[in-house]
Image: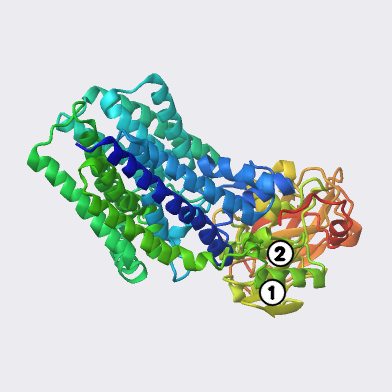
Amino acid sequence: MPSKSSKANSQSRSLNWLFVFIPLLAVTPLLIVKKIMALGLNSDSLYLYCLYQDVFVTGYSFHDWTLSPAPCLFPDMALYFPMLAAVRRLGPALLLYGFTYLTSLFVLFYLIARLLTPSRRTAAVYVVTGLLFFTAFLISPYGLLIDEFMFVPGRHAGIILPGLLLLYLSLRASLGGIQPREAIVSFLLAVLGTASDVSLATQFIAPILLAWLTLCAIGAAPYRVWLIACLVLGCGSVSGLVLEHTLVDHHIITAPLVLGADFINPSRITTSFHEFIHSIVFYLIRVKPDFGVLTIASLSLCGWVLWKIYEEGVELGENNPISTRLLFLSCYFIISLCLMAAAPILTGIWFSWPEVRYLIPFFLFAAMYPFLFMTALNGRLPHWFKLGATVIVISFACWRIVPPATLVRGHDFDTPYPAKVQFIDSIAAKYKLAYGYSQYWVANLYNALKHTETRINQLHEKMVPYFWINSTDAYFGKPGFPRRYPEYGFIVMDGLPREEIRERFGDPSFVETGPDCEIWIYNRPEDLAFRQFIHPFFLYDSARRSGYFPAHPYPLTLYKAPGVPWNFPGTVDRESGGTVDVYFPPDAGVNMIDISLDSSEEYEIEFFERGAVEIPLHHTLMVPKPFAKGMAIHYLPLPAPIIGKDIERLRISSTTRYGRWSAGHVYLFRDEPYQLDIVRNRPPYPNKIK
């Protein structure tokens, strides 16, 4: 039996190793955040930063923000927003989050390790060693890879923290029973975690319950406690899903990691499976072979543990809690891998190797499992084995961490100003542009890193507003100012259909080409179509209405895209010589019309002032025949004498009388061609986060 002096020497050596490991571990968030700031800022990684900036700095409504399908409320948002409020800079806030995240991982794995050993020092040493091993694997010398985004809030790794806490509580409860306080905490974690990211269900909750069920099946844990856990975690998960669906407007069903019939996509299972195999081979053999070796070694060790427990008939249950909990962790490790891989395959969302992000919890556990195993068997491991493992870890960590750590400088954490963002800023200042369009990958990046007050709102490639991780309120300009529809004056062409844009809006007044970027500028007073083409999408919100639907007939309130057939559902058709009367609510502030008409005819529009039963105003509006097929949209200014009149109705008639024709939609708007004067002369605005 070891003497007291040998135990003291062993504990002293353990503490000495901690003094080496902890500084190395503390450097890793610096290295990862440095790479994120240099290489990893895009519209996805800036999701929570854009949300904070729009709501708490600019003043847009949280209610009008289209959250990510995984909104990352807890713990990402709960931790990150106070940090942004405290430091008001992107880089330092990411550093604070990285250090907090790493510290939380240490605390949670320490709690789990304490269930495997009575020694606090042993648990602390092995957990720090394991985390150092993992972060050294995480830091790639070959550029920024997808797994390093786990230190960025809003990138699916935040739910690892509540998941590990649920794992710890389940390990305790599997032998000791569930106390009321633990049940409440588990329920709240399941609610908040599932509402933040539904992958908590397949990455933690389902594997935990299945691993627990395995213990019950072999008589190592009582079924009664497991049933209570199923009730608590099941109700919590369902409540979390309900909360998530109330927060997130699902234009596309993207709760991709819930294993349920409503989410399974049979048509893509085979393709997703092939992509999964290709991605795993590509990632673990070509991109990160060290992770591949680690994964194979950890799975082999886990299989060996399961085999030894079975072969030797190890006594399990309350009489041998350490072996029972090690079996629980081993079963969880295997089951979680199966479910993490199966969920995106069955739902058909495994498209390419970046989907490896769904396996980040598995990679973390693959690195930590050998050290949890050594924690449980610490007293039976020979000194040479522990010393050898320590030397391997510190050598590998020094090789990966020390060289890049010597190159870290304070300016590495300044908010970057990419060349593309600089170019857009310069063009906006040159032409005095306040609002523009672009696709998603440009819009959020620009709005987060710009140095001007210009705003870009995003479009889908089908040329409709794209409500995805952005503020719908922002399409209507700055909050706190007259809610006039803003003047859109440019479009960043990356990823958008050039020919369709030219066909719909004509040639731009100017074209500016910069670094990986081309901007078309439509800033002429006659560019009505460009300024107003997304306006109809916002007329449904009466609180922000800056234009008018017809009161009758109802089908003409429904937007018809250009090119749809003349007899498209919702059109109002007439025989040759027929007319369509369109009625509007009271208003005297409109000066333009957005009208969709069959492109085979020419038209005349008569206007009737409110109270004038059958006497039209003297000035009519002629709509020429366009060179198009199907329905064509016309954006036309109203005749000057009609502006300011309270128009009750208008009458559309065909002047060519060739045959049947149809009207698609009719809207009246107020166009503000000189709104930039309002933007330039507004009162001082709150300081933007830099």
Q: Quadrant of residue 391?
A: bottom left
Q: Foreground residue, 444 or 504?
A: 444
Q: Foreground residue, 393 or 425?
A: 393
Q: Is residue 551 above or below residue 671?
A: above
Relative to 39, 523 lies left or right: right
Q: How far from the left and from the top, in percent, is residue 27?
A: 51, 57
From this viewpoint, is residue 70 visible?
Answer: no
Three-letter amino acid code at the position of disc 1: Ile
Sequence order check, earlier mark of 2 and 1:
2
Relative to 167, 630 lies left or right: right
Q: Is residue 614 above or below residue 144?
A: above
Q: Residues within 10 Å of mark 2 (few under 14, many from 20)?
A: many
Disc 1 is placed on an element classified as: strand
Q: Foreground residue, 645 or 352?
A: 352
Disc 2 is placed on an element classified as: strand
Distance of label 2 from label 1 (alpha carbons): 10 Å
Q: How far from the left and from the top, in percent, is residue 95?
A: 58, 53
Q: How far from the left and from the top, in percent, is residue 375?
A: 29, 42
Marks 1 and 2: in contact by CB < 8 Å? yes
Three-letter amino acid code at the position of disc 2: Gly
Q: Foreground residue, 79 or 686?
A: 79
From the image, tell me which residue sits under label 2. Answer: 436
From the image, tell me which residue sits under label 1. Answer: 519
Q: How far from the left and from the top, in percent, is residue 138?
A: 42, 60
Report the coloring of the rendering: rainbow
Q: Is residue 573 above or below residue 101?
A: below
Label count reads 2
Residue drawn at 24 percent across, 53 percent down: 385
